[in-house]
Amino acid sequence: MKHAQILLFIGKGGVGKTTCSVTTAVHLADKGFKVLLASLDPAHNAGDALDCSLNDQKTSVTPTLDALEIDLETLIQRYLKQTSEMMRHTYRYLTVINLEKFFEMIQYSPGIEEQATLEALKNIIFQEAFHYDVIVFDTAPTGLTLRVLALPSLSMLWTQKLTGLRKKILDLRSSIAHIHGEKYLTVEGIQEKLATSEDDDATMRELRQYHTEIERIRKTLTNPNLTSVAAVLNAEEMPLLETERAAEALKKFQIPLKLLIVNKVLRFEQTPPEFMRKMQQQEAIIARASQAFPQQTLLQATWQQEEPRGLEKLRQFCPEAAEFFMNLL
């Protein structure tokens, strides 16, 4: 079965990332590709752009376009619930830990938004990749998205370290068992043998399963034949600098940045005198972007008096991005 192309739109808040990702999804769907648009942006603007109500269940927008919008708070609660249930099953002997209190505190811990967002990204790709030709992700603003994309590589290192530590624990248990015999624990009235081998250890099985899942999503995100990143920016200094930093991070994570969309580009048949300085700055930023990203395709999307909203207006906006990605399909 053919794996869907994964398109990730990133960008600083306010540059028009959602509009570009949604309009690309609409254009690709109009060309006959089966497309899933998935919004991970806490701002919830994808539904506004499509002029329809979206939630975390797929909504049919056109015969070839489905869309969903993830709520971050709901996502965090769901992730914590799943993790809590897993811990209760795997670590039943740790009755001294008040899991309810533990998860009540951890939901406010640094990194929980990133981990929950990665779980959503992973689940959508794993569950939908063979049902669609393209999955378009409208991501959160750049900082959060880059931290999410860094997690697979970081998690790989953590699981490798934790697996090594667990092996040492099991080896020590095995040595003690040979001398003093096997140890048993009574949990909720049930006697269980304390694991001494990797095959019998629930913790090791959990680590291996998580390692497999993380390795799979890492390989998907770093595969240039499957994944493409489009960076959206405005022809201004701050968005350009943020895009350059994002590109460096993506290069470090080995996630392929293929397209830049300079959005909200001003165009005049006759430039008004009061806009001369602005036009000079705009051209200078576009030239710098072109020079800074020689290996990426650079597109320009014209400034609109109002944000395109609804299918008909979206169909009139920036078809070039969809045409670029069609060559990859």
Image (cartoon, helix red, strand yellow):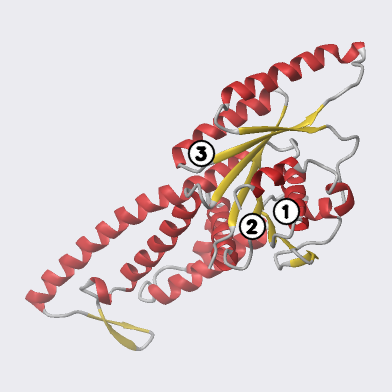
Q: Are marks 1 and 3 in contact (CB under 8 Å)?
A: no
Quadrant in which residue 237 is drawn: top right
Q: What residue type is labelled 2?
A: Val
Judge left or right: residue 57 versus residue 143.
right
Residue 108: % across, % down: 57, 53
| Category of crowding for the residue at label 2, using alpha-carbon neighbours closer than 10 angstroms: few (below 14), some (14–19), many (at least 20) | many
Q: Which amino acid does label 1 sit on?
A: Leu
In the image, which disc is placed on residue 134? 2
The residue nearer to you, when weighing 2 against 59, is 2
**Residue 96 shows up from this direction:** yes
Q: Is mark 3 on a helix, strand or loop?
A: helix
At 87% across and 35% down in the image, what residue appears?
Answer: 304
Give the spatial CA distance, label 1 vs label 2. Answer: 8 Å
Residue 243: % across, % down: 61, 31
The residue wearing badge 3 is 250
Q: Are marks 1 and 2 in contact (CB under 8 Å)?
A: yes
Give the spatial CA distance, label 1 vs label 3. Answer: 25 Å
Q: Which residue lies furthest to the left in this view?
A: 179
At 38% across and 68% down in the image, what residue appears?
Answer: 206
Q: What element carries label 2?
A: strand
Q: What residue type is labelled 3?
A: Leu
